[in-house]
Image (tube, rainbow, N blue to C red):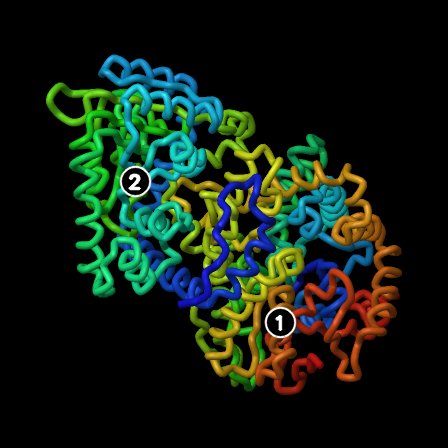
Amino acid sequence: MSAPAQHPILDPAAAPPFPAAALPVLRNAQLRKNVAHATDVIQGKRNRLVAEKTDWTELRESASAIRAHTLEHLGEYLAEFEERCTLAGGVVHWAADAGEAREIILRILQEEKADEVIKIKTMTSAEIQLNPFLRQNGVRAYETDLAEIILQLGEDEPSHVVVPALHVNRAQVREIFARTMNLPELSDDPQALTAAARTYLRKMFLTVPTAISGANYLIAETGGVAIVESEGNGRMCLTLPRTMITLAGIEKVIPRFRDLEVMLQVLARSATGERMNPYTSLWTGVTPGDGPQHFHVVLLDNGRSAMLRREMERQTLKCIRCGACMNTCPVYRQTGGHAYGSVYPGPIGAILTPQLQKLEHAQTLPYASSLCGACYDVCPVKINIPEVLIDLRAQVTEKERAEDRRFFDPIYVGMRVANWVFASAGRFRLAQRAARLGLRLFTRKDGWIHALPGVGGRWTMTRDLRGLPQQTFREWWAKERGR
Amino acid sequence: MNSSMRASLFITCYNDTLFPETGRAVVRLLERLGVQVEFRPAQTCCGQMHANTGFRGEAFSQAKRFIKLYVDTEAVVIPSSSCVAMIRDQYPGLVSELGNASLQQDFDALLPRVFELSEFLIDKLRVEDVGAYFPHRVTYHASCHGLRALHLGDRPLRLLKRVRGLELANLENLDRCCGFGGTFSVKNAEVSSAMLTTKLQDVMATRAEFCTALDNSCLMHLGGALHREFAAMRTIHMAEILASTETTVAEARA
């Protein structure tokens, strides 16, 4: 086994900057291999299933339009959802931020006299750091999604929104289960691992009467909730418990039941590379004698409504959490999810997290991308992630450039000088000459630069740089073609 | 082929300074194809570096400068996909934000006349066989901007396949970024290097002598590592391959 890594921090306010957080991961060969393998497999399946769909472009267009339309009328659809859900016997709560959402959920649990709660996989609960809060207040939360169990028992954190334990391989799962479930003889055969998880879970399903879920979609027209999953644990949580609490971001609403036709098609193919996900659960309020008899929905804002104002930022909320952008991202493939310091990693996380944090934290995330555009290509709701990354970079720069300490920051100095230089061809010519002379100091006899000082050293750390040629193109043109 | 075609070469700031041989190759190639090439010495930079690093205000001035300088040209040819992508993808937003009607008009008129080199050859000149000779095993790296922003598709490969003597080696994971990403390569140098290493595994597996592309930025990144490692491969801009003939071989790149 590799040495125990530091516990990942998924709180953007406390997480180290992306480049620093990425460093230990880059040295973790096992993790990088796990991430590359898993993303290859999922992406391969996704690509095959998208290719077979002759109307993919139209489906994607529709999904994008549904999400964009919803966000433009979010207030109306949320009001409709609240009305319908309440009529159907649900109780709708509104939480302005993470703290409010945690308090609301704790209050419901206390009214239920619950000291244990079972959970369907919900990334939103990780966003509001629900589990540690409940623990502090005497409630034990048990994850029921297989990947989430692995993480909970292994005292680890999710690194992907669809496949939270993507960074863990089978041998590591065996080790965690063998240790925490006291099964020293356990093999790493997938069936044996699943059986161990099933035994572990069965007890909870039968004894814990309160459950928490997230939501893939809230349906305004019916007041219903939809979740999609692969294992059936969510279905169990919806069957046995007396009380269900659904936590959902306000952007999760869709207008009509029939919108699911489009949304479910693009989600399954994009997320897991399946034509249809194994379990799709839909429920509306409460039904006497069937399923939970107490049903609460907590609608979470937590920075979302501030993103609605400009179209540029608003498109971020179209996200349906399929994770396709992570699987294709060449940065994520190297670093995995933990380096992003947020429960939302990868390209979508790089735009969502800083906005949810109102750019007070996670300022390095918009730069955690080479702007290669692979994320935009695969996004089933057409979020132009590179465009938003660039916009957020401009916002970060706007904020930072007023700070005194940025005055001597090499990137800021370089950009200011470059702008002054590029404003005049005469200055540019002089700057080219100056650069040629300056770099001559560092150029070896073979004509190449092997080491540069300062920020240039970040380049020559792994890459040589050819010394500047004796003649720029414009000098050649002036000499050969100039009058 | 239109023999009276005129084209203005926007060399780009980094090609001008770091890769003048690419510019000379573009001139040689286009002139051989009967194009009258001009170079406006007032040109500097398209503003991509500023825009992509978050210096939006600075990018505005570069965009204005570019549009004013080229508004009266018949065609602008740019041997760098990422600079063309800047003009196509980011200028529209910048120009509309400036809200200057005459600048908008100039830009709208200019935009369809801005070409990446392979676009100019195939879409404008309608030529695939440019009469080149390059007797080497070559692999083609598709830059992200050429592939996903400009949708160059198989244009570069169509051009390479018609080069006499050239043996084209297929590159696996063609759509994967090399990790350059402009200032990303220094701001996130370690991650960028990890991406580079992954890319180089595929590049080296081709056993080609040359790795070519339509962007010297990717090639500077790949070539810098190949040089560091004393690898048996060099990088070369596609313009230099296409300009090369039996009598004019490509200029050696160090």
Would residue A278 appear left or right of A17 to someone viewing this image?
left
Please identify, in this view, whether the residue under mark 2 or under mark 1 is nearer the observer: 2
Task: Tell me whether marks 2 and 1 sit on the same chain.
Answer: no
Q: Which residue is mark 1?
A: B237
Q: Which of the pair B66/A320 is nearer the observer?
A: A320
Three-letter amino acid code at the position of disc 2? Tyr
Q: Quadrant of the N terminus of chain A?
A: bottom left
Residue B44, above or below B129: above
Q: Which residue is mark 2?
A: A142
Q: Residue at x 64, y 75 (%)?
A: B240
Would residue B22 appear left or right of A417 to someone viewing this image?
left
Q: Are marks 2 and 1 in contact (CB under 8 Å)?
A: no
Query: Marks 2 and 1, Cα distance to the nearest angstrom?
Result: 57 Å
Q: Residue A138: where, in percent of width, then height?
A: 36, 31
Q: Residue at x 53, y 70 (%)?
A: B197
- Element type at marker 2? strand
- Element type at marker 1? strand
- Residue A395 appearing in the image: yes
